[in-house]
Image (tube, grey):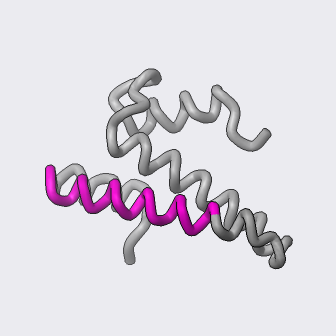
Amino acid sequence: MYLDSAKKEEIFSQYGKGNTDTGSAESQIALFTYRISHLTEHLKQNRKDFATARSLTKLVGKRRALLTYLKKQDISRYRAIIKALGLRH
């Protein structure tokens, strides 16, 4: 599987407050970004996989909502996660 517990721990430790910090907005945004990039690569090879396309759209919406929440709560954390993940140009 592409996303095992070791990979999740790595993402949470890098972008969250620690290995077990699964609830912070930054760690969730980082996890969604990893999943979005994986699904995007899958859809490049399987263009007619409409179920995956729908789940990709839902994931992008969830990440967008978390980014909006983080922007309203703390603009410096928002800017830091955007820069770390390279989401905006």
Q: Position of residue 80 (x, y in %)?
A: 28, 54
23 in relation to 39, above or below: above
45 in relation to 5, above or below: below
Q: Is residue 64 left or right of residue 59?
A: left
Q: Is residue 77 magenta?
A: no
Q: Nearer the viewer, residue 84 or 55?
A: 55
- Name the residue furthest top: 20
Q: Position of residue 2 (x, y in %)?
A: 75, 43
The number of numbered badges drawn on the structure is: 0
Image point 34% across, 60% down: which residue?
65
Most common SS among magenta residues: helix
Q: Quadrant of residue 78?
A: bottom left
Q: Is residue 58 magenta?
A: yes
Q: Nearer the viewer, residue 60 or 51?
A: 51
Q: Is residue 31 left or right of residue 28?
A: right
Position of the N terminus by quadrant = top right
Image point 58% across, 33% down: which residue?
8
Position of the C terminus by quadrant = bottom left
Q: What span is in magenta?
A: 55-74
Image point 50% across, 64% down: which residue?
60
